[in-house]
Image (cartoon, rainbow, N blue to C red):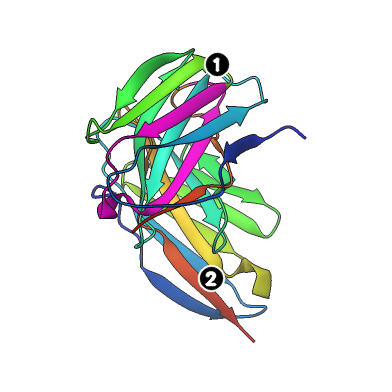
């Protein structure tokens, strides 16, 4: 997790849009994962970006800029059930390295 | 159901004891992992096996010993448990190493008293 930086906590309102940023070290980089983890549960896969650009998957989109070592997860039309931790993870020459996660609280 | 399963889900034990956690996946994956998630929710890889062979062994005390009897199973044995071992341990599997989605088991919450 020392190579990956993401905000610790974020709060957003139901129905709004929120962007969770992640920066990582670019050496040996292969791709960038996003996982969602609800409290007391296992992480579940959201997205994997290898190429630059935005990939959309329903209400969730993920963006990658390889040259900047930067990614973000965009959540639209927020719902209460989106309250969870969001982990970015770097895939490369080393084993998958997870960031410390961003705990998102969605409020009414 | 196709999934990654772990047993037990909860494990409470005293310092100095030896315990095992079992993991099985029926996804036909070649690669399996053990992760530790501490109280600060930091998820860190401990071991990775590919086709029953140890690939990754991060800086983990040698009290922790993984065993993979076949591709579908990766068990974790812990000797001489310490207070600092208290955490949630997740097993995961993927098609292969590198850029493959990992499927996580439900986790084993270990509490050492």
The region drawn magenta spans: B73-96
Q: Where is residue B111 in the image (x, y as percent from the top left)?
A: 40, 56
Front residue of A56/B97: it is: B97
Q: Which residue carries the number 1 mark?
A: B71
Q: Callout 2: few (<14), some (14-19), or many (20+) C-alpha neighbours within 10 Å?
A: many
In this rendering, position of residue B107 left or right of residue A7? right
Instruction: State the quadrant of the C terminus of chain B.
Output: bottom left
Q: Which mark is residue A28?
A: none
Distance from disc 1 to disc 2, alpha carbons, whole Å, reads: 40 Å
Q: Does the magenta stretch include residue B77?
A: yes
Q: Where is residue A24 in the image (x, y as percent from the top left)?
A: 30, 47
In the rendered image of this protein, does residue A75 appear above or below residue A108?
above
Q: Is mark 2 on a helix, strand or loop?
A: strand
Q: Position of residue A102 (x, y in %)?
A: 42, 64
Q: Is residue A76 magenta?
A: no
Judging from the image, mark 2 belongs to the subunit labelled A
- Image point 52% across, 33% down: which residue? B22
- Image point 30% across, 44% down: which residue? B81
Instruction: State the quadrant of the N terminus of chain B.
Output: top right
Front residue of B18/B104: it is: B18
| Name of the residue lying farthest toward the right | B1
In the rendered image of this protein, does residue A7 appear above or below residue B62?
below
Q: Which residue carries the number 2 mark?
A: A18
In the rendered image, which quarter is residue A75 located in?
A: bottom right
| Residue A79 is at least partly visible in this image | no
In this rendering, position of residue B1 left or right of residue A64? right
Front residue of A105/B82: it is: B82
């Amino acid at each position: 997790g020392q190579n990956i930086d993401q905000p610790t906590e974020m709060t957003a309102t139901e129905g709004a849009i929120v962007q969770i940023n992640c920066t990582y070290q670019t050496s040996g980089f292969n791709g960038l994962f996003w996982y969602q983890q609800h409290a007391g549960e296992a992480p579940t896969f959201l997205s994997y970006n290898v190429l630059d650009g935005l990939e959309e998957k329903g209400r969730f989109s993920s963006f990658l800029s390889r040259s900047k070592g930067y990614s973000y997860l965009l959540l639209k039309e927020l719902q209460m059930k989106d309250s969870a931790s969001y982990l970015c993870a770097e895939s490369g020459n080393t084993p998958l390295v997870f960031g410390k996660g961003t705990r998102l609280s969605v409020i009414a | 159901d196709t999934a990654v399963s772990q047993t037990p889900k909860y494990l409470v034990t005293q310092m100095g004891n030896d315990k095992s956690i079992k993991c099985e996946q029926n996804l036909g994956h070649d690669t399996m992992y053990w992760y530790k998630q501490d109280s600060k929710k930091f998820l860190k890889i401990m071991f990775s096996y590919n086709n029953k062979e140890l690939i990754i062994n991060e800086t983990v005390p040698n009290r922790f010993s993984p065993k993979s009897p076949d591709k579908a199973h990766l068990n974790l044995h812990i000797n001489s448990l310490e207070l600092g071992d208290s955490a949630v341990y997740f097993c995961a599997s993927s098609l292969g190493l590198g850029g493959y989605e990992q499927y996580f088991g439900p986790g084993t919450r270990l509490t050492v008293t």
